[in-house]
Image: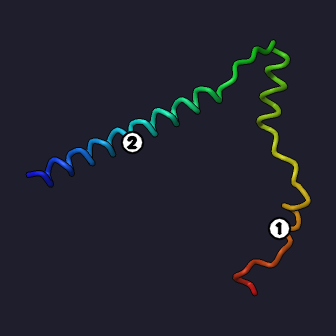
């Protein structure tokens, strides 16, 4: 009987931990959000910037020129 009570407390503590971890993660996500306001022209420029492909870096270029491991 005593063993059952211990395991119940342990399960309850684990459940509380999981809930707390989820709450902290949600809070971090909420705090990481930023609000900014744009006029129509700025909005279009912002969307174009998001849609544009990134410029390849020198590291990416070197990586893409390497021989793949499965060809060695």
Which residue extends farthest bottom?
72
When the figure is inspected, residue 68 is found, relative to residue 21, above or below; the finding is below
Q: 50 or 27: nearer the eye?
A: 27
**Residue 32, how many percent across, how many down?**
65, 30
Q: Which residue is mark 1?
A: 63
Q: Secondary structure at mark 1?
A: helix
Q: Mark 2 to mark 1: distance in Å? A: 40 Å
> Tag on residue 10?
none
User: Residue at horizontal 84%, vertical 19%?
Assistant: 42
Type of colouring: rainbow
Precedes in sequence: disc 2 or disc 1: 2
Q: 62 or 16: nearer the eye?
A: 16
Q: 23 or 40: nearer the eye?
A: 23
Q: 33 or 60: nearer the eye?
A: 33
Q: Secondary structure at mark 2?
A: helix
When the figure is inspected, residue 64 is found, relative to residue 43, above or below; the finding is below
Which residue extends farthest front?
2
Q: Which residue is mark 2?
A: 18
Quadrant in which the C terminus appears = bottom right
**Residue 38, how many percent across, how many down?**
79, 15
């Amino acid at each position: 009987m005593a063993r059952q009570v211990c395991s119940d407390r342990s399960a309850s503590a684990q459940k509380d931990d999981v809930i707390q971890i989820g709450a902290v993660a949600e809070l971090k996500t909420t705090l990481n959000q930023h609000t900014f306001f744009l006029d129509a022209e700025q909005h279009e420029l912002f969307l174009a910037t998001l849609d544009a492909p990134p410029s390849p870096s020198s590291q990416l270029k070197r990586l893409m020129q390497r021989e793949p491991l499965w060809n060695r």
